[in-house]
Image (cartoon, rainbow, N blue to C red):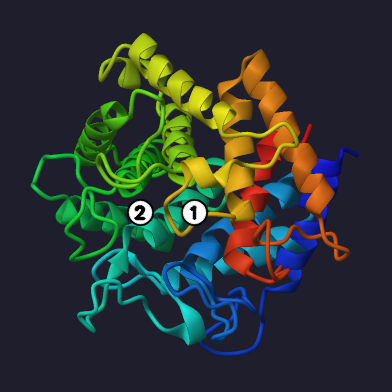
Amino acid sequence: MSETGKIIDNTLKYVVASQEFYPGEYYGAFWSEKAYHGPLLDWHAGGSHHHRGAGSAALAMWLEARRKNDSEMRRNAELAFDWLAARRHDRGGWLEIQNSEKPSNWENTGLDELSTIATAFAIHGLGYALLNGLPPKKIYMDCLQKAGYWLLGIEWPSGSGIFPHHERSPYDTLNANAHAAESLALIFQCLAKIYGKPINIFLQGAKRGFVHTLPLQWENGCYPYRANNGITINYTSLVAWCFLNLLEILPGELTGSWLEREVINNHLNKASGFLCSCTKKDGSLDWEKNETTTAKHNVWTYAITANVLTRIGGKENLKRAGMILNYLSSIKTGSGLLPMRDNGEVITECLFMQADMVVFLKDCRN
């Protein structure tokens, strides 16, 4: 087994062991000992049951259960999706859960802020699981539709392809646009293929987010955090990951009618060129020159960058992806888990980060 395969297997064991089956509110959810998200920057302020983490954890378990024909893991993954579906807010999306089960309050309003990012990871997990055999329950169909309507409702200005990071956010944030575009594409495709309900407004919303965001790339290939503001390895990889997913979800004739495939490939190749330039000879990332966000030093970024370079492909991209994966193997902790940061205190038990990394690394297993 490859070293990456060992990391995936060890992380999956942690994910499986983190699922709770106590009667009540969190039955089927995943406990994260370390509830962390910038800008809080506090690993020790109390754990939480993350909605976004459940999306990735349940998907990782569902795909592994299918691979190994593990009926118990399949059942537990389905229970996790049931919990996630039940936690959807009445407005259609999911809250970003921070420390000690508290919803995020990014804009300091004290009001509920449904999160485009949390919603996108929930939909990514649910949608890909449905496309891979998850039983098509009505509650899942309702989740897809309501999330799609919520995403279209927060697009502002209407018809612009700009989807805020969370409710009441005033910024054009590229990763939120990309997440929304991927989610709307996945919602459209799942409803059409599985439930026989092709709702074209979701497809058009995906197109707007994609066509608006793809050309916001800098000349050096970076996708900034916000439009023309903030060099970043992390969010370049995240935007590229969302768009690779979108291209995978939708048939070629649909995306081909939005933009010429050559144009799309040129943008992806420029992004991979930037990411390669950010990878040092030892496989570590060159943070100081290329990251101004709170994601600096996150090992999560290594995993998604390796995913993107592997999927875009080509000799140099695969070489750099291999270097990153070798670096990850070198910093693996004694528990078999990756640390959450490449410097400072060693922290491993952050469920949403670990679950996301399983999802990212599965494309790099070999």
Image coords of residue 307 (percent x, y): 61, 36
Three-letter code for the amino acid on which mark 1 is drawn:
Leu
Q: Do the CB atoms of the residues marked 2 and 1 lie less than 8 Å apart?
A: yes
Left or right side of 159 for 259? right
User: Badge 2, how many Cα within 10 Å: few under 14, some, many 20+?
Assistant: many
Q: Mark 2: which secondary structure?
A: helix
Marks 2 and 1, how far apart at CA: 9 Å
Image coords of residue 186 (percent x, y): 40, 41
Left or right side of 166 for 236? right
Quarter of image, res 171: bottom left
Image coords of residue 266 (percent x, y): 40, 15
For the C terminus, the quadrant is top right
Residue annotated with mark 2: 144
Image coords of residue 339 (percent x, y): 72, 61
Three-letter code for the amino acid on which mark 2 is drawn:
Leu
Quarter of image, res 341: bottom right
Q: Mark 1: which secondary structure?
A: helix
Looking at the picture, tell me which residue is in the foreground, 134 or 15. Answer: 15
Could one spot residue 186 in this view of the protein? yes
User: Badge 1, how many Cα within 10 Å: few under 14, some, many 20+?
Assistant: many
Looking at the picture, tell me which residue is in the foreground, 59 or 240. Answer: 240
For the N terminus, the quadrant is top right
Asked if 238 appears above or below 350 in the picture, the reply is above
Mark before the other along the chain sequence, 2 or 1: 1
Residue annotated with mark 1: 126
Residue visible at 40% across and 53% down in the picture: 120
